[in-house]
Amino acid sequence: MAYSDKARGYYDSEIKGIQGAGTFKEERFIASPQAANITVEFPAGAPHKEVLNFCANNYLGLSSHPDVVAAAHEGLKERGYGMSSVRFICGTQDIHKELEQKLTGFLGTEDTILFPSCMDANAGVFDVVLDKEDAMIADRLVHASIVDGMRLCKAQLFNYKHSNMEHLEEKLKETQDCRFRLIITDGVFSMDGDIAKLDEICDLADKYDAMILVDDSHASGFMGKTGRGTHEHCGVIGRIDVITTTLGKALGGASGGCVSGRKEIVELCRQRARPYLFSNTVPPVIVAAASKVIDIISNTTDRRDKLEQNTIYFREKMTAAGFDIREGIHPIVPIMLYNAKLAQDMARDLYGEGIYVIGFSFPVVPKGQARIRVQLSAGHEKEHIDRAIAAFTKIGDKYKILGKKKNEIIEMYGL
Amino acid sequence: MNEELKKTIIEYIKREYLEEDAPEEVNESTPLISGGIVDSFSMVSLKTFLEKKFSIKIPDDKATPEAFDSVNNIMNLLKEFNVT
Ligand SMILES: Cc1ncc(COP(=O)(O)O)c(C=O)c1O
């Protein structure tokens, strides 16, 4: 046995270090399908509790939708459970091609390739598209999976201040000698729910002859009038060279991701992207259900419209109640509290009131910007949202932060 | 020279990492990475700047978050490359 005391002691001290830093993550066990209403066991061993879920990426409320579940059953029956193969050996069914084509149509791109996850799409795509004579120019707040993907790529790395177009332009000037430049951004940033300025980014890309990659994981299915994503919202469909996105959030919420965009880039991913080549195919049951999701949201915008209404309603009421909210239009609503302990305490008290939300603090968000992140869903009914607002108001009052501005909250609780 | 060097680096950090209206002050001992001004991802700009400015190549094992955590630390790092 080579798992020595030295190794055990080291790992154990690392775990204690995480606990000491207050960043230890504990799972909460959910004993029901994903939905607005869920049954949770927390802490482990505690009796089951019914709570309203305001922290899922279930934006369209499709995670447990009867039509989606039925499509999954049908897929299971018609195409089986597993494929026991990567795509290019014997892991591609007719329904995989069909889903790729539907995604291409929905996203308004040239072609699409499925990956086991969007994390895998981001891990694979950069190394395929760029080489050492090229440059990656990324927004500083891109998702961790993009940061990791860029690390696996030999191209030179540059980054610009979050959504700062002058700084992006500086970097574009600085890299003019490179063969290819790729501007890299999230469509919607997951901690603030703010939206990339894709129209300005496209203009800069045209001016400086650069390509654009957008990770639209927090937008596909509901941003823009017909839910195509951030590119629709910003009026730049057709101008984004590569979109990566996930099936694990609005689009059914199971798992899977894709690279969608210029057809040569997609084809090269089929030939060379390592997570595509060396990881198992997306299982038929998920493919069948995701395909149904695309049908549903292509036929009607009802769900994205309801999500939009829910978002406007919640943002208005919470602002009126006196919370300091990051402005915006996205169903990610950051309730700013600045102090990490205040965010944890309030999230715990809200859980006591039957509202499941999470407090986020450094290093997940910048220092001194702790918050509770609320995520709305088309699965929420007005009464759910009203209950959340009432609970927030009660707890906000307990901590005396209603109507308080940023500097007043910081004065009371520190950073 | 030493002071001038410090000033150049501080100026760069302010321009590259702070918003124009940012309240933060940066001096030679301000914690950059542990203080949340520069994160490990955006550190690459600073590294590239130093390499270009002084025509050096900082190997990855020397470009640690500790080595970049303050202007003083960076000055120590630069000494190893005979930049003073
Ligand atoms: C912006 C962004 N990209 C990628 C991912 C990863 O997606 P997946 O769960 O499909 O790996 C996430 C999910 O957390 C995300 O928020």
Image (tube, coloured by chain):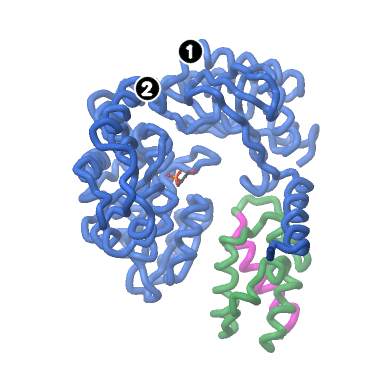
Chain colours: A blue, B green
The quarter of the rendered structure image containing the C terminus of chain B is: bottom right
Q: Is residue B37 visible?
A: yes
Horizontal and vertical percent position of residue A216: 39, 44
Tell me where the magenta segment starts and ends, as one range.
B1-18
What is the three-letter code of the residue carrying label 1? Lys
Q: Which residue is mark 1?
A: A382
Which residue position is annotated with label 2? A65
Q: CA distance from mark 1 to mark 2?
A: 18 Å
The disc, 1 or 2, on the residue closer to the chain's N-terminal end is 2
Residue at position x 50%, y 58% from top?
A147
For residue A375, above or below residue A117: above
Q: Residue at x 54, y 21 (%)?
A: A38
Residue A308 seen in this snapshot: no
Image mark 2: chain: A
**Quadrant of the image for the N terminus of chain B?**
bottom right
Please report the residue visible at 32 percent of the width from the left and 30 percent of the height from the top.
A72
Determine whether, in the image, residue A119 is placed left or right of residue A102.
right
Task: Give the x, y percent position of residue A289.
Answer: 31, 32
Residue placed most toward the observer, A284 or A16: A284
Which residue is located at x 59 percent, y 16 percent? A50
Q: Residues within 10 Å of mark 2 (few under 14, many from 20)?
A: some
**Front residue of this view, candidates A288 and A369:** A288
